[in-house]
């Protein structure tokens, strides 16, 4: 992961480590992260002090990804990677909620 700020390095590594099973793929490409959701939406996002900015968005369905994901558009900024992925992927949201439920159940 060359050419990354220390904060980007931490954020991108954490995203890959914690959520690899929550998407088809999560890859670092230059100073961005390329994520392919289980719904076959591909997003390139970049982390900065402002948050996670959507740099590119496409869909393998052949439709405009911004139409498929009306809530997400290029240049949108999200406070967390989870917020971005929840807006892009119903499957991510489902898996994230299941994991949270497991962790909370283990506390009882």
Image (cartoon, grey):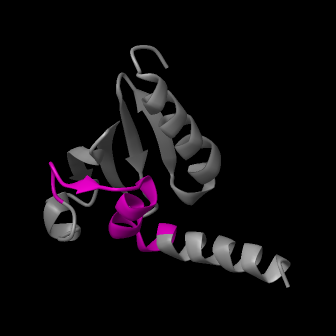
Residue drawn where x is 48% and y is 24% of the image: 6
Residue 63 visible in image: no
Q: Residue 92 placed where, x, y %? A: 49, 67
Outermost residue on the top side: it is 2
**What is the quadrant of residue 63 in the picture?**
bottom left
> In the displayed structure, would residue 40 be above or below residue 17?
below
Observer-nearest of 49 and 39: 49
Q: Position of residue 91 (x, y in %)?
A: 49, 71
104 or 39: nearer the viewer: 104
Looking at the image, residue 73 sits to the left or right of residue 25; the answer is left
The segment highlighted magenta reads 73-92
Q: Is residue 80 above or below residue 48?
A: below
Q: Residue at x 85, y 85 (%)?
A: 108
To which quarter of the image does residue 95 belong? bottom right
Picture residue at 39% right of the left edge, 14% below the top? 3
- What residue is rendered at 79% in x and 82% in y? 105
* Residue 87 lies within the magenta run: yes
- For this view, does 49 lie left or right of residue 95? left
In this figure, what is the number of numbered marks? 0
Q: In the rendering, at what x and y percent does residue 100 appear?
A: 65, 74
Residue 8 at x, y = what percent? Answer: 43, 31
Say if residue 42 shows up in the picture. yes
């Amino acid at each position: 992961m060359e050419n990354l700020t220390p904060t980007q390095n931490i954020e991108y590594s954490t995203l890959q480590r914690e959520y690899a099973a929550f998407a088809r793929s999560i890859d670092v490409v230059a100073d961005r992260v390329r994520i392919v959701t289980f719904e076959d939406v591909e997003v390139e996002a970049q982390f900065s002090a402002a948050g996670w900015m959507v740099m590119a968005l496409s869909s393998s369905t052949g439709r405009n990804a911004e139409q498929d994901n009306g809530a997400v558009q290029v240049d949108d900024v999200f406070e967390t990677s989870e917020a971005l992925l929840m807006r892009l992927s119903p499957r991510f949201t489902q898996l994230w909620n299941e994991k949270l439920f497991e962790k909370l159940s283990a506390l009882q």
